[in-house]
Image (tube, grey):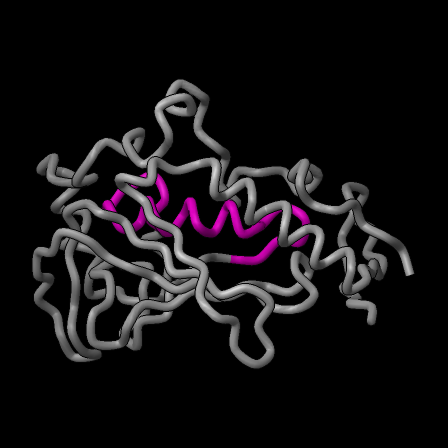
């Protein structure tokens, strides 16, 4: 089976590209293996769950650090907790097909970037730039309220914007040093560019090159 997507090249031309099921499985396996090498397991734990119908990979990522949660779609009072988990789902056709992420609807991250039903706002999916790696990095930094990844223009939960900005201005956020999320040997490396600043032509070395139909 092939998966097809209209890809915009550097010169502005849009052409269809496609990958096979085998390409998709290989790209996902490579990114998953890279993900396991990245974080300090004392702080970030990654658990592989049983994939459901229509899923290629289902992960549970837990950050063991101080953060804040909400309990319902009407809850507006963030409460302190010592850890937070988010589920991440990849679908057949990855990395062409966008992945999704969600928290429990009654225990979700208090953040401008999390919808009131627990769905995480991960930003625009840019084929061959966005990946499992970029999404997980956004989410684990969101959980510690790292303002460098927070999108205040997100429509997810505008009621948390002033609360989050107050935490940043008072020095309470991020709740731990972002470097402590990563394995010690990686902490001296320069930070990964986020999707907003990454060039469309910067393809992850783990992603497969576009194949024209």
Question: In this rendering, would 9 be left or right of 152?
Answer: right
Q: Position of residue 35 (x, y in %)?
A: 50, 43
Identify the residue at the far top of this view. 188
| Corner quadrant of residue 106 | bottom left
Q: Is residue 128 magenta?
A: yes
Total tally of numbered discs in the picture:
0
**Who is closer to the viewer here, 142 or 183?**
183
Q: Name the residue located 37 percent from the left edge and 68 percent from the top edge.
A: 102
Q: Residue at x 34, y 36 (%)?
A: 40
Residue 50's place in the image compared with 200, above or below, is: below
**In the rendered image, which quarter contains the C terminus?**
bottom right
State the residue in front, 199 or 3: 3
Occupied quadrant, residue 183: top left
- Residue 88: x, y in percent? 45, 62
Q: Compared with residue 200, is residue 160 higher up or lower down, i.e. above or below?
A: below
- Residue 163 as seen in the image, left or right of residue 54: left
Whether residue 64 appears in magenta in the rendering, the answer is no
The N terminus is located in which quarter? bottom right
| 155 vs 53, nearest the viewer | 53
Q: Nearer the viewer, residue 153 or 91?
A: 91
Q: Position of residue 156 (x, y in %)?
A: 34, 67
Does residue 144 lie above or below 1 as drawn?
Answer: above
Magenta stretch, residue numbers: 124-150
In this image, 13 relative to 66: left or right? right
């Amino acid at each position: 089976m092939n998966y097809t997507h209209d890809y915009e090249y550097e010169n502005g031309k849009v052409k269809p590209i496609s990958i096979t099921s085998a390409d998709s499985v290989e790209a996902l396996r490579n990114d998953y293996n890279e993900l396991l090498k990245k974080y300090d397991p004392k702080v970030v734990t990654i658990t592989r769950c049983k994939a459901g119908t229509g899923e290629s990979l289902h992960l549970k990522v837990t950050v063991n650090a101080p953060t804040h949660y909400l309990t319902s779609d009407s809850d507006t009072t963030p409460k302190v907790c010592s850890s937070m988990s988010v589920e991440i789902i990849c679908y057949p056709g990855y990395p062409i097909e966008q992945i999704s992420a969600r928290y429990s609807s009654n225990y979700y991250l208090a953040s401008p970037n999390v919808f009131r039903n627990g769905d995480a706002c991960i930003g625009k999916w840019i084929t061959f730039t966005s990946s499992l790696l970029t999404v997980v990095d956004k989410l684990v930094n969101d959980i510690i309220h790292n303002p460098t990844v927070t999108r205040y223009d997100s429509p997810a939960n505008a009621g948390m914007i002033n609360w989050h900005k107050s935490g940043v201005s008072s020095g309470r956020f991020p709740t731990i040093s972002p470097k402590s999320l990563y394995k010690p040997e990686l902490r001296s490396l320069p930070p990964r560019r986020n999707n907003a600043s990454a060039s469309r032509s910067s393809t992850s070395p783990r992603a497969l090159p576009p194949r024209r139909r």
